[in-house]
Image (cartoon, rainbow, N blue to C red):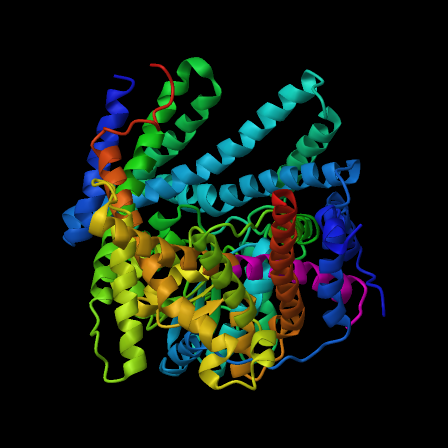
């Protein structure tokens, strides 16, 4: 019963949500609305669970004095301070002069932006060391990449402004995006849609059970 | 040691330094490369232009600080265009890290329009967990999904938020503006809202995502598309603004040329090496 | 040049430089900033979801429902009153995952989420990504202008060949093999275009950080 009840819940709710797409009657729409409200609340609990799990894992590492434990103490300290400040700031915690928003604006925001900006350096390094053109297909990929990269920025049109408009790098880039790129992307989109529909039905019908992790 | 041999052994930190210099240089000394406006960006601009003056528009700002350089200029320029048409704006956020930066961005634009008041001309409904479930829930009633706004005012309190008096569900909006950085974002708005509730949509997205949305653009599911910082810069040009996106395009140009050279030089080095081995 | 006097901007700038120091090599400053970021992020997400969903969408409506005159079981569309106990209990059951022996109870909450999103995604992809895309593909091949017509034919050929590439129920030989090959070419062009746009996106993020350091911190604009 520890697996059968969740499978039944998934099947019933999944089929009901599909039905709600086609049937606007309130006998269907009101329960569907309620289920969506439930999902929103459970997802929010999930985020809190995630934070609790981070605490548990790192407390464990600090207790066992694993390698790098001082940094994990920084992590745990930052987490606890942020949560305590956020809770004590009250329901208006997002109004600009609060301590929570100071943490958001001066710690969270710049660090998150910088973490992602490191990728620019890695992409340049990878372009030099790993981008190898050895086949016709790789050559097509590289040619498209170069044309799009240069055509998408002003310098591409600047260097080709002496050519007819249809031969400007920007025009070529736009044609690549609208015709060949679009055709392939649409094929991928349609194929992925069929895959998602199949997987969704497999989950709803209980054929796919990987979300029920555990032995029981 | 020949040049190509030296390039083969080049420490990648030199590449980082060159890239940093090429990005910083144009910020200190702008080059003013001319921008040309592309059709998808013009479609975005025209879609807002065609909205009746004074309408209430839904703006979904689904991003966080990691994509600030691409998303914030789009949000600001779109909001200015809507305010210039005396449209009212209802904003939602579905990304965890987004509410703060979205609120700051909206307030920055609102401060440029002293006659626009919060709760009357614009409202930030804040963040809600739940991805697509929130989008579909809003279809039964915006206030159902967002019982309070970003500032913790009740959305059924029409004294504090008069704008919400005429906001029921998606039928209250002639246009949905999706400024999105990933999941959930434009794709989910197209699948769950445009498909189900048939609200016209336009999208401003990160450059990583933009190629994925060309099929939606071609099929008419979205009527305009801003792709990345370049799209934001072209939109600023249409609006005769010189914002941070436009200021960043010179650096973008030089960086792209550098990456293109890296691809070509890297392959040249490897080709010469293979020829040398074969000989 | 006028340096910022804002302590917060100095914190942001110094943390930015700590993270950038990773480009030289991994070092304690980077590790400190990285762990600080993870801790602050996790804490922020907890607080955000607590106030914006758990309190706003659960606790407050329940409090109103059980207040005097609240009619707790007179729910209606959008106002579910006491029925919100159900998601509240399910959300709490999620935490049983942290305790091995009773962790199976969290599956009920997961089953609700999986059921809702499986249903939403199935219909969303079907309508938005399949039906609408097939409709959008049915375009006239002759538009009256030679250039546009060639593009339309190329688009249709590319779409069909790319779709055929993903048909793995038959071996890619003969006509199917040739069509798949053409499909691969279109796919490569698509991946190349995607790579170009990805480069643009990553460089933009770097530009944003340097704009912060040069303009907000060092006051160079």
Q: Position of residue B204 (x, y in %)?
A: 46, 66
Tell me the residue at 36%/59% (across/down): C186
User: Residue C215 lies in magenta, yes or no?
Assistant: yes
User: Compared with residue B24, is residue A65 higher up or lower down, i.e. above or below?
Assistant: above
User: Residue C9 lies in magenta, yes or no?
Assistant: no
Q: Position of residue B154 (x, y in %)?
A: 44, 57
Tell me the residue at 73%/36% (across/down): C31
User: Compared with residue B103, is residue C17 higher up or lower down, i.e. above or below?
Assistant: above
Of B232 and B266, the residue lying toward us: B266
Tell me the residue at 78%/37% (across/down): C27
State whether residue C69 appears in this view.
Answer: no
Q: Position of residue B89 (x, y in %)?
A: 44, 70
The outermost residue toward the front is B279
In the rendered image, which quarter contains the N terminus of chain C? bottom right
Of B257 and B146, the residue lying toward us: B257
In the rendered image, which quarter contains the C terminus of chain C? bottom right
Q: Position of residue C181 (x, y in %)?
A: 32, 52
User: Compared with residue A71, is residue A30 higher up or lower down, i.e. above or below?
Assistant: below
Tell me the residue at 55%/29% (across/down): A52
Please, what is the dominant secondary structure of the magenta stretch? Answer: helix
Residue B248 falls in image quadrant: bottom right
State whether residue C219 appears in this view.
Answer: yes
Residue C92 falls in image quadrant: top left
Of C205 and A101, the residue lying toward us: C205
Left or right for B206, reference B219: right
* Magenta stretch, residue numbers: C196-221
């Amino acid at each position: 019963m520890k697996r059968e009840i969740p499978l039944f819940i998934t099947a019933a709710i999944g089929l009901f949500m599909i039905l709600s797409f086609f049937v606007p009657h309130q006998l269907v729409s009101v329960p569907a609305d309620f289920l969506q409200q439930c999902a929103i609340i459970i997802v929010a609990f999930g985020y809190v669970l995630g934070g609790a799990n981070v605490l548990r894992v790192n407390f464990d590492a600090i207790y066992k004095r694993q390698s790098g434990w001082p940094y994990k103490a920084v992590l745990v300290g930052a987490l606890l301070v942020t949560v305590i400040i956020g809770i004590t700031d009250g329901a208006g915690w997002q109004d600009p002069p609060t301590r929570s928003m100071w943490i958001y604006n001066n710690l969270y925001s710049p660090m998150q932006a910088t973490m992602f900006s490191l990728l620019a350096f890695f992409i340049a390094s990878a372009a030099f060391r790993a981008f190898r053109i050895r086949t016709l297909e790789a050559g097509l990929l590289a040619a498209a990449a170069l044309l799009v990269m240069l055509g998408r920025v002003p310098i591409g049109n600047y260097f080709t402004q002496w050519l007819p408009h249809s031969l400007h790098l920007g025009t070529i880039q736009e044609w690549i995006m609208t015709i060949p790129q679009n055709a392939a992307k649409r094929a991928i989109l349609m194929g992925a849609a069929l895959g998602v529909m199949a997987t969704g039905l497999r989950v709803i019908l209980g054929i796919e059970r990987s979300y029920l992790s555990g032995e029981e | 040691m020949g040049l190509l041999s030296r390039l083969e052994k080049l420490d990648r930190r030199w590449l980082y330094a060159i890239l940093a210099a090429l990005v910083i240089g144009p910020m200190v000394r702008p080059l003013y490369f001319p921008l040309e406006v592309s059709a998808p960006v013009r479609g975005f601009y025209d879609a807002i232009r065609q909205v009746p003056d004074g309408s209430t528009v839904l703006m979904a700002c689904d991003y966080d600080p990691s994509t600030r350089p691409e998303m914030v200029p789009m949000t600001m320029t779109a909001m200015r265009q809507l305010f210039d048409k005396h449209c009212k704006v209802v904003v939602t956020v579905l990304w965890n890290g987004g509410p703060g930066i979205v609120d700051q961005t909206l307030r920055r634009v609102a401060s440029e329009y002293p006659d626009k008041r919060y709760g009357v001309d614009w409202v930030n409904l804040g963040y809600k967990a739940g991805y697509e479930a929130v989008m579909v829930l809003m279809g039964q009633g915006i206030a159902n999904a967002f019982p309070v706004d970003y500032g913790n005012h009740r959305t059924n309190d029409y004294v504090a938020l008069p704008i919400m008096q005429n906001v029921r569900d998606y039928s209250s909006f002639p246009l949905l503006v999706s400024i999105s950085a990933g999941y959930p974002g434009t794709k989910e708005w197209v699948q769950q809202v445009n498909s189900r509730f048939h609200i016209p949509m336009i999208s401003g997205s990160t450059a990583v995502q933009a190629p994925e949305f060309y099929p939606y653009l071609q099929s008419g599911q979205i009527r305009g598309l801003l792709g990345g910082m370049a799209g934001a810069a072209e939109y600023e040009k249409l609006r005769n603004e010189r914002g941070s996106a436009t200021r960043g395009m010179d650096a973008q140009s030089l960086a792209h040329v550098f990456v293109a050279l890296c691809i070509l030089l890297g392959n040249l080095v490897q080709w010469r090496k293979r020829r040398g081995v074969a000989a | 040049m006028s340096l910022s006097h804002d302590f917060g901007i100095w914190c942001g700038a110094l943390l930015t430089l700590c993270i950038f120091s990773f480009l030289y090599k991994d070092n304690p400053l980077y590790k400190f900033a990285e762990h600080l970021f993870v801790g602050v992020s996790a804490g922020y997400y907890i607080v955000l979801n607590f106030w914006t969903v758990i309190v706003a969408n659960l606790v407050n409506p329940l409090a109103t429902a059980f207040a005097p005159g609240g009619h707790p079981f007179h729910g209606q569309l959008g106002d579910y009153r006491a029925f919100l106990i159900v998601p509240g209990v399910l959300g709490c059951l999620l935490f049983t995952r942290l305790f091995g022996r009773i962790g199976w109870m969290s599956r009920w909450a997961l089953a609700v989420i999986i059921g809702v999103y499986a249903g939403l995604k199935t219909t969303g992809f079907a309508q938005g990504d399949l039906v609408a895309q097939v409709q959008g593909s049915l375009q006239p091949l002759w538009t009256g202008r030679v250039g546009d017509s060639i593009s339309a034919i190329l688009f249709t050929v590319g779409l069909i060949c790319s779709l055929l590439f993903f048909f793995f129920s038959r071996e890619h030989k003969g006509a199917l093999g040739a069509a798949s090959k053409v499909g691969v070419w279109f796919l490569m062009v698509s991946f190349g275009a995607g790579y170009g746009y990805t480069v643009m996106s990553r460089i933009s993020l770097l530009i944003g950080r340097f704009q912060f350091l040069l303009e907000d911190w060092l006051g160079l604009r």
